[in-house]
Amino acid sequence: MTQFISVIGYQLKHSVSPDFQQAALDYYKLDIRYEAREVKTADLLSAIYKLRQPQNLGANITVPYKEETLHLIDEVDDFAGLVGAVNTIVNRSGKLVGFNTDAYGFLRALHDDAGFKPENKRVIVLGAGGAAHAVCFALLQEGVSSLIIANRTMAKAESLAGSLAKHAANNKISTEIAAVPWQSSKLTEAGKSCQLIVNCTSLGMKGSPYEEESPLPSDLIPKDALVYDLVYNPPETPLLRMASEAGANTIGGLPMLVYQGAASFKLWTDREAPLDIMLPAARQALIKIGG
Ligand code: ATR
């Protein structure tokens, strides 16, 4: 019997996950199809419900359903519960178990591809959505010295900073945590001495109304910082272009995307993800969609 894994989100025209996941499944000659399933909000409940059918091995969950899905499944692993978002579901004999592999993907790319050690570093995170939650909890657990969060909607930055501070206090983590207003003088001040800037907003994303925009002006990028953009299409976003011009190191979102997918692959198939197959397949798919 052919089995299925899907990516559920809206919209999925630009998703490269089906390409690199299918390449990995084919590498092992598994009779499994990885399919993109665009689902409107009103149909999310039934789409998740159907994942319990025996032919479904599980799913990836992407924008905008990572938070909502947490409440529609049977069990959530500890880290996904902490982050408050699920990006991977595994169907265990009709029971849906949720995981979050975004943080793993983010940290692996930070360590392996950018060669950056976050311990005791000063960090600015731009954005306060699902991706920012995973990134911030990952950085907190890595022992960064300070974490400044800036988001267009200040209340969301404050709420994320509050959850992080609570987690830090409960686990004796001494990271300094603050929310600052979007494009404010406080952000400029923090920018001068930060060592890592992570963009978790959708600014600069191809096909969005903000494709030409950068979340930071170029004069706010220190030349000895690492600038990490979670956006992977285009490979060089306006933020990364500016950062390179300022002399900073840069990393885009494609390695993270593939590493989070690799961790999901292992959860579904219990096999090591063939990264040397997945990475080129993802790059190829990006070229095909015009990245
Ligand atoms: P994800 O799961 O990828 O994090 P999300 O939860 O929809 O997706 O979050 C998108 C992030 O991009 C949010 O931080 C959002 O800011 P708001 O909380 O103010 O909505 C940010 N974002 C989206 N469009 C933006 C824009 N035009 N200017 C600034 N920030 C923007």
Image: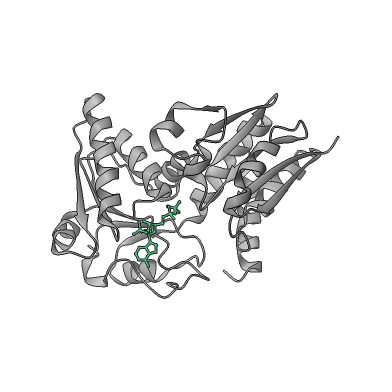
Out of 68 and 54, give the one closest to the viewer. 68
Q: Quadrant of ligand 1?
A: bottom left
Residue 14 in which image quadrant = bottom right
Query: Where residue 61 sits in the image (x, y, percent)?
Result: 57, 45
Residue 272 visible from this viewpoint: no
Residue 127 visible from this viewpoint: yes
Measuring 25% from the left and 55% from the top, which residue is drawn there? 154
Query: Where residue 64 sits in the image (x, y, percent)?
Result: 51, 52
Residue 16 in which image quadrant = bottom right
The reply, left or right, for residue 137 in relation to residue 121 is: right
Query: Where residue 264 sits in the image (x, y, percent)?
Result: 59, 38
The colour mode here is: one colour
Residue 92 versus residue 156 in the image, above or below: above
Residue 266 in which image quadrant = top right
Residue projecting furthest to the bottom: 212
The C terminus - image quarter: bottom right
Out of 263 and 167, give the one closest to the viewer. 167
Residue 79 versus residue 227 in the image, above or below: above
Callout count: 0
The reply, left or right, for residue 56 in relation to residue 260 is: right
Measuring 27% from the left and 35% from the top, which residue is drawn there? 143
Measuring 54% from the left and 49% from the top, which residue is drawn there? 62
Residue 272 versus residue 123 in the image, above or below: above
